[in-house]
Image (cartoon, grey):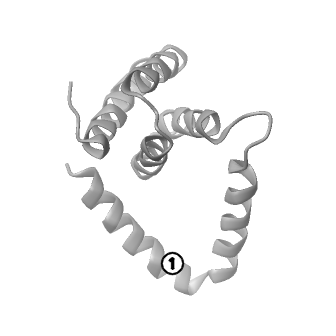
């Protein structure tokens, strides 16, 4: 699977919904900006938390979006894998399987591999 292609397709579907429900997206975007602002926690830490939730809820789109944000924020593969260890510990087998998907996305977005 190409994570870049998958996110492009996802954004296309979301765009169709946004045309039908613009108010919902305005509210969601405002909430996103407020949640991601640097405060006691920096944006990278918040995105790692979001990745954990994305994996635990088994949301491929969320995994892709938050992984891409973590790459943009300069997350190293080591940091990413340590987060996946904690996520796997807390979520067991399903989180390990979806964590492997997240690592695949990370490697695609960074152009690296195992």
User: In the image, is residue 46 above or below residue 93?
Assistant: below
Q: Nearer the viewer, residue 34 or 21?
A: 34
The quarter in which the C terminus is drawn is top left
The residue lying at 46 percent from left, 23 percent from top is 79
Residue 28 lies, in percent from the top left, at 67, 65
The residue lying at 56 percent from left, 85 percent from top is 20
Q: Nearer the viewer, residue 106 or 76?
A: 76
Residue hosting label 1: 17
Q: Nearer the viewer, residue 98 or 30?
A: 30
Residue 109's image quarter?
A: top left
In the picture, measured across the screen, residue 83 lies left or right of residue 46, that is left
The residue lying at 20 percent from left, 30 percent from top is 113
Q: Nearer the viewer, residue 75 or 93?
A: 75
Q: How many marks?
A: 1
In the picture, measured across the screen, residue 53 lies left or right of residue 26, that is left
Residue 50 lies, in percent from the top left, at 58, 40
Residue 39's image quarter?
A: top right
In the picture, measured across the screen, residue 69 lies left or right of residue 77, that is right
Residue 29 lies, in percent from the top left, at 66, 66
The residue lying at 47 percent from left, 35 percent from top is 55
Task: Check the image and name the residue furthest to the front.
Answer: 74
User: In the image, is residue 59 above or below residue 94?
Assistant: below
* Element marked by disc 1: helix
Task: Check the image and name the residue furthest to the right.
Answer: 40
Residue 43 lies, in percent from the top left, at 64, 42
In the picture, measured across the screen, residue 92 lies left or right of residue 28, that is left
Residue 63's image quarter?
A: top left
């Amino acid at each position: 699977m190409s994570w870049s292609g998958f996110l492009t397709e996802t954004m296309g579907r979301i765009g169709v919904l946004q045309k039908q429900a613009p108010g919902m997206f305005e509210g969601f975007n405002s909430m996103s900006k407020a949640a991601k602002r640097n405060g006691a926690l920096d944006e990278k830490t918040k995105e790692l938390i979001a990745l954990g939730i994305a994996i635990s809820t088994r949301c491929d789109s969320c995994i892709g979006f938050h992984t891409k944000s973590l790459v943009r924020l300069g997350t190293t593969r080591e940091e990413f894998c340590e987060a996946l260890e904690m996520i796997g510990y807390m979520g067991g087998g399903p989180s390990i399987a979806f964590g492997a998907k997240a690592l695949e996305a990370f490697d695609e977005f960074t152009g690296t591999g195992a």
